[in-house]
Image (cartoon, coloured by chain):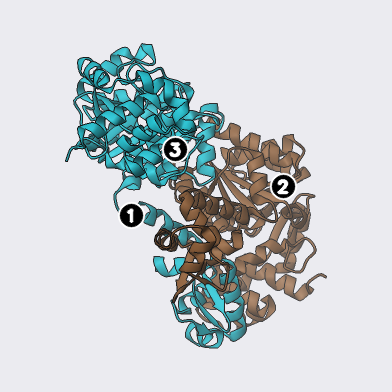
Chain colours: A brown, B cyan
Amino acid sequence: MNASEAERLARVTLNSVGEPGNLRLASTVAELGAETVLEALRERPDDLGHDLAARLRTADPARSLEAADKLGLRFVIPGDPEWPDALLDLGRCGPLHERGGIPLGLWLRGPLSVAEAARQAVAVVGSRSATTYGEGVAGDLSAGLARDGRTVISGAAFGIDQAAHRAALATRGPTVAVLACGADRVYPAAHKRLLDYIADVGVIVSEAPIGGAPTRIRFLARNRLIAALAQGTVVVEAAVRSGALNTASWAGALGRVVMGVPGPVTSEPSAGVHQLIRGRDALLVTRAEEVLEAVAPIGTHTLTDLREEEGLRDRLTAQERQVLDAVPVRHGAPAASIARTAGLAPAKTSAALSRLEDLGLVVGQGERWHLAAQVDESA
Amino acid sequence: MNASEAERLARVTLNSVGEPGNLRLASTVAELGAETVLEALRERPDDLGHDLAARLRTADPARSLEAADKLGLRFVIPGDPEWPDALLDLGRCGPLHERGGIPLGLWLRGPLSVAEAARQAVAVVGSRSATTYGEGVAGDLSAGLARDGRTVISGAAFGIDQAAHRAALATRGPTVAVLACGADRVYPAAHKRLLDYIADVGVIVSEAPIGGAPTRIRFLARNRLIAALAQGTVVVEAAVRSGALNTASWAGALGRVVMGVPGPVTSEPSAGVHQLIRGRDALLVTRAEEVLEAVAPIGTHTLTDLREEEGLRDRLTAQERQVLDAVPVRHGAPAASIARTAGLAPAKTSAALSRLEDLGLVVGQGERWHLAAQVDESA
């Protein structure tokens, strides 16, 4: 089902007058539709309308689409077959650095359907000033992902990004470059051949208007698209203030799997990744198989959680485990009956129950004990 | 308070006839005292008594203590001022690789009080076949810990262990070497100078009888002492089957802080550490300050858990957070009242509640909802 032409033209207009990731514009459009918003901005301008008035007067969506066509670009909006629905998750996510929201539309260059490509995709991102180690690992990972049929999504920047794209291309796997500048532009200039190659066999994606320059705001807005298009984001080398960590934050906020590749603790470009893993914001991964396991459609989080649960159980004494196994799932039982089931003395049982309660594994209500919810789930 | 001489002699005897980490012997002695157990083994031998009968006939504890004295060794048992009570935690821990239990006594060589040294101690362990990177990091970490007044505990082996001891010694910090062979022996032979130095300024600890050889069983038993004596264990490089991972398992089982230093994913000696961190069995650490934060007497686990909690909350949508904040801690409230508090439509509230329930953050009972225990605790 294609969206109406009027809606498409309105989105081209709004996309060219607003900045990518303007959360207010995005939310209003998501709620009311672009035509209505555009009309309101023109006829009853609020402060956003006033902000955009000048740009609105000169916007010519039909000419933009014509120009795009000549440049080999297309514009897709929600409802188009090529629109990746994964981006709709951005509508349920607060802003980061004041950027956010579902993009009004995407400019695309290249034969690959981004909707198709995003179905099984992993983002591989990292430092521009990467080390040989980092580029090597990014390449190995991406090649492994591509061999498994996954799309490798990245930002076409120096360092980790280009290593990821190149490895995917070398493996003849699908790859998506999401740019902060217009999809027709080449940034960085040194990556002209890389971007042309991606435009030949993969797809270049951008929210920025045709010819748009890569600004700081657009990089921040761009990062959310990388995170949203992929089922998981792997950070390979990122200094503590790297933009790749912004992408990781988006992935986390979107409920995607966030992964990090460790490196030597003496290497600055690994410090940001170590911070992510240390704070349990990212899962440590060392090879493509581990990434694939983590982004598996079912079970990723379950798997991780189960492991943590096992970790907790492993830390129990044999007696505590005996008692835990004797605690009923739901309706609860008095300590005396748990002691009988466990085959342990009442005093020992009570001591174990109170330690298990401290650990959040059992819940005491009045005289009765039952398993805490998470134990129940993992049992 | 010193233990009775008869108890001490009985423990010397049992220590010399039983193998370190014989859990059955350790538990019976912990329960009945060494004198009683020794008498029973001699007069009413069960199969353990039969196993040990030959050794029992030749045991001469007074002569052992005399020989020890000449070698500059002393024997400490529970109740002695120099006995480290941290080892008693081993009495509440199941066996690993069939080794376990509170040691019957410790042979000590060196001026440092092991009880004193264990009060603020970190174990730094790792691969024998360490890399230059690993030895460098182990040295930096240990020097940082020693500068902060922490005792560095390790096993005096090649690789990571020796780097840890050396750095502690170079910083004039206390260091404890726990050996699998007798405390009078030098193993590995190449570490004679290192061990002599530790015996001069630190302390060498062993459970094995005087002159005892370092056997596989004794290494496994030794690892539990390293883990138990320290508040936390840092693994710096460990291949996937490294003995250092056994020490880490003991530390985890004992409720001590388990930490791991990452390295290049291309480095085999880091693979075991990455596995620990990946499985959330170890906290990733990159420098001494992070180790110190993790082993701080209060708050380590709290800190980590809070972070995880925040991570989960961060992943919620704004609406879900609104709803979560409106759910009562204990007595529960019906969805309609939660919706009013949250200022959200009933349908949205119900949807949010069911997602929050899936995440284990709220519990629905009948018609009422309350916060899950762990949310309550971290609030």
The reply, left or right, for residue A172 in relation to residue B206 is right
From where the camera sits, is residue A191 visible? no
Q: Which of marks 2 and 1 is in front?
A: 1
Density class for disc 1 (Cα within 10 Å; few <14, some 14-19, many ≥20) is few
Density class for disc 3 (Cα within 10 Å; few <14, some 14-19, many ≥20) is some
**Amino acid bearing label 3:** Arg
Q: Which of A77 and B279 is in front in this view?
A: B279
Where is B253 relative to A263, above or below?
Answer: below
Query: In which chain is the residue bearing label 3?
Result: B
Where is B75 relative to B256, above or below?
Answer: above
Q: Residue at x 48, y 21 (%)?
A: B129
2 and 1 marks in contact (CB < 8 Å): no
Are discs 2 and 1 located on one and the same chain? Answer: no
Query: In which chain is the residue bearing label 2?
Result: A
Q: Mark 1 points at which residue?
A: B299
Q: Mark 3 points at which residue?
A: B24
Provide residue B332's location: percent of width, then percent of height.
Answer: 48, 81
Q: Nearer the viewer, residue A170 or B178?
A: B178
**Amino acid bearing label 2:** Thr
Q: Which residue is drawn at 69% across and 73% down?
A: A10
Tag 2's secondary structure?
strand
**Amino acid bearing label 1:** Gly
